[in-house]
Image (cartoon, rainbow, N blue to C red):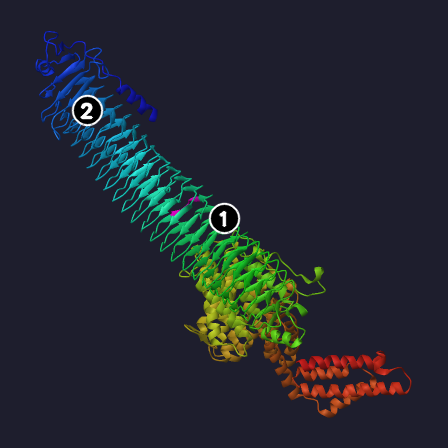
Amino acid sequence: MEDQTMQDADKAMVPEVLDENLPVVTVSTKPGAADFTTISAAVNSAGETGLRIVVEGGIYEESVLELKKGTQVVAAEGCGTGSATPVVITARADHPAVCSRVSGALLRDVRIEHQGPFCSMACVVIEAGNIKFERCVVTGSVSIGILICGAASPTLTGCEILACCGDGIKVADCARPEVHECSVHDNDGFGIFCTGTSGGNFTQNQVFANSNAGVAARGTCFGSFQNNKVFDGKQGGFWLEEEARCELIGNDIYQNQKSGIQVGGYADPMVQKNVVRDGLKGGIVVHDHATGHFLNNEIMRNVMAGVGGTDSACPLFHSNLVKDGRGGGIVLHENCRGVFEKNQVIGNTHAGIGLKGASNALFDGNYVSDGSGYGVWIQERAVSTLQNNVIERNMRAGVVVTDNADPVLACNIIRDGKHAGLLIRHNATGRFRQNTLSHNAHGNVVLLEQASSELVANIISHGALGGIIIRGTTSVTVRGNTICHNDGANIAVLDNSNPTVDGNVLTNGAGRGLVIMDKATGLYRFNMIRNSELAGVYVGRQSSPEMIANCVCDGKAAGILFEDEAQGRFTYNIVCANQNEGVAVHGKAHPTMECNVVLQGGHGGIWLDANAAGTFRGNVVEDSGTNAYRCGTTTTANEWRLAERNTNTAPAALAEVLSEWAEEKMRTPGANKKVILVQNPDTDSPGGGVAMATQCSELLGLDPSRSCMLVARFLGDAGQFEDAEELITITKGFIGENGPFKMEPAMRSQQWADMSLHCAELLNKWAAASQEYSRDLMTRAAEYARNAAEVFSQQPQYRTTIEGFASALYWVGLNFATLTRLGGGAQWSAQQAAEVAEEALEVAHSMVAPDTPAHRVAELFFVDGVLSFCKAEAVASKYIDDQGRPQELMQELLKKSLQTMETAYSRWCEAYGEKHLQTVKAITMIGLLQGKLNGQEASIEWYRRELRIREELQGELHPRTQQARRTYTSMIDERLSSNMPDAKVLNEAIAASKAASVENSTVVVARFLSEAGQFKNAEVILRESQEAASEAASQSASTGRGEGLKAKSGPEYVRWGEISLYCAELLNK
């Protein structure tokens, strides 16, 4: 297309072949040498058919030379404008030298001058028609060179217009000239000046050395300027104002003393494929309210900015090259707006892009590189948006935001800078989302003074001095970022800064993961901090952060390290699989740590120095023997002090259950199935007690709800139900629709359902661990389960959502069954609660397939049994209709319940074995049902079995274990009170055991008493037995049968040891 345009222009510049059929007359200044002595006389002689007038060299001072239609005025051969004897048409009065209103006229090789008074009429006036000027020279010292006005459409080819006191060519009204290969220069006004509604085509001209701009356009003109050279304009190259809509294509604009192209007013030009270079000031400047399209231009080596925008301009710059500007690449001031996309901004000084004032432009897909200053400098009150740009290899900061600027940066790449990647300082704010910052020499992100920006979902890696460095009194929000492989620290929070750091992944740091020092504070929630070479979290000096629900794992040193006088509050965090201590408190640090989970510290769970202090409550710390709690002093009292503050530990037997739960809960469509590391001191297991799964850090990605549910699970299994529910409530608020952590709606619904499901389970267990079921707890548990079922039922039918729906139905059935027993709650009566449970179970049974695992089927049998039992209880309490036969109905329901519970028990035993927290639920219910149907003697063995299993799996301090012990001991107490052997019988039993030398009969009797809660009586019996053992040993010594107890042999010593061992257990209880 471009080549065709050039060919058309070349054809137009070939002088038109003269019509040989026209009559010819001659003109000469020498009398008698030609037909006429004046050109005017010759023109007047022309008829209707036209006339060719051949003019000999000389000066022709004409009154007004007004051509007729078809008249051709040409210089005689050898009398062209460059000859020694040119044809010169001149005027001295206040009128033009040449005037034309006709079509078909022609002037060729003629020089036209105006010597009249200053401000006289233009040298040439073309008011209408399509006259042609070929190889003419137009000059003069009075006014405009050529005025083209009205509806004229002349053609100027190869002409030279110079040294006019006004403009070289002025185009007014609605004129449409064609100006080709002309030279317009050294005029005191504009070279070419277009006004009104004029148009026309201006191609391959040279416009230079004019006192004003080379080309000016005003009004609503829409001329097309292509392939011209415009240079050395004293007021610039092109100047477009008012509402001009000109087209500038392929022009070479250079060495102008002001801007190469200046666009003002409301002008809206098309500026394409031009070269704007070597200007003594700016390259292209757009101001006032101007717009315009600027495409594929090369703008380079200008003294001031390559592109400048100011006032309220709003241009579009697309695919331009802005290079080597000595005053910057693209600089916007005031209220400038506009769109700048896919431009290359390379090698500029000061800044590749500079934004000042209140500018508010969009920069999309630009490449900004190799500047000797900043890549992008946003200052004052600028609020622009930068997205999808690549900003690299700049000598100063890739992007600096200062003063009160408030930009938006999204999806940019900022890398390989010789200074900081993103520097934010003073009172600047701004939102920085989904950018990639890497390999910047002075830190990828640095915030200073009082900056208060928002960093969301960025990838920040390989910073030489760190990932994010927060200093001064900044209050930045850092949310959902991936910050990795940085030297120093992935995040360093210093001075008095107070950031909010939420939902980030800090991984593979060459130094520390998160550093908080000086007097810094801040809120740090839902972050994953993993694989740090040094401490995952370092808290030093007098800092006092608040850390909630973070995951600190897989580090090569301590998980959390406190030093100096650091304080802070740490709750609901999970700290696991770090090679040194999980938590180390050094110096005089005194943090508050509550409800955290600390697992698999290579050198222990929590280390406390001799001078350190703090508050430790309700943490779940892995039961790893002497390494669970370590103190930097030999005083065992300190260890006890720390252990007492951490009243709950994670027993070894929880590992299998937690791993299974994690594997089930952590699956999502397209996600991996990694499970958290759990190490336990089980000496019988292969590999020295590592009952495992895979790396914890592979678990979560950017999903903070996962680690929070895991912590909540640990807290719940440790009996800290209220803490666990509070954590889930915090998490739901964090990822909710109005929360700070943004997720896709489908994923949010999935996580919401998961957490509701976990709350349904948690509150059920909470209620079960209480001495009596709480109607409030069970009502909330039922509501959570129903909410989860509703959400899962609306999710796409993936395997995981189907499993989630099945689990939700399980808890709907279980919780509403329990609500039935309690007489209903909230909007549900007991009968309505039973109907909801039955409906859920019906749907759940319909989902059973041939490949449904046995333990899943067992769950349904279990809930069926619970529902039958609860309905029986509700009948007894008259909460539901007894059908006129309460006793018969109760017995039927209880028998049905026992039958289904026994089926559930056998199925779970096949799947898990008896020692499993699922199986023990069936054992509990069978004991309860046996007692109601067949009396206490039938149930006591089941209760004893439950107690032993819970002690082993959950630990003696767990609320469910304590509840099982209360139930069992109350039954023993009731049994003994009704059939208690008197002291005489017990003494006779002891005497018989002595006589028969039965070593453990005393222990059996004492155990029997202790299980009934009669610890003092049991101790009396054991003490008497010890005295008897000691007496027997003395007798053995007196008869010479060894050393008695000292000989550490014989039945007396063994019996004494057994009694002492049981005494230790008894007094502990």
Q: Which quadrant: the C terminus?
A: bottom right
Magenta span covers which residues? 386-390
Closest to the observer, 454 or 828: 454
Name the front one of labels 2 and 1.
Answer: 2
Circle on res. 139: 2
Look at the image and tell me whether residue 805 can be seen: no
Within-10-Å neighbours for mark 1: few <14, some 14–19, many 20+: many
**Percent position (x, y) of residue 812?**
49, 66
- Near mark 2 (Cα within 10 A), the count class, few <14, some 14-19 or many ≥20, is many
Q: Are marks 2 and 1 in contact (CB under 8 Å)?
A: no
Residue that appears at 41% across and 56% down: 425
Image quarter in which the N terminus is found: top left
Q: Is residue 388 magenta?
A: yes
The answer to which of marks 2 and 1 sits earlier in the sequence is 2
Query: Residue 146: which disc?
Result: none
For residue 1068, above or below residue 386: below
Q: Tag 1: residue type? A: Asn
| Residue 1023, placed above or below residue 18 | below
Q: Position of residue 948 (x, y in %)?
A: 66, 74
Label total for image = 2
- Label 2: which secondary element: strand
Nearest the eye: 435 or 262 = 262
Circle 1: element type: loop
Q: What kind of residue is marked 2?
A: Thr
x%, y% of residue 499? Answer: 45, 61
Q: Give the overall secondary structure of the magenta segment.
A: strand
Residue 148 location in percent, x, y? Answer: 16, 28
Q: Which residue is mark 1?
A: 440
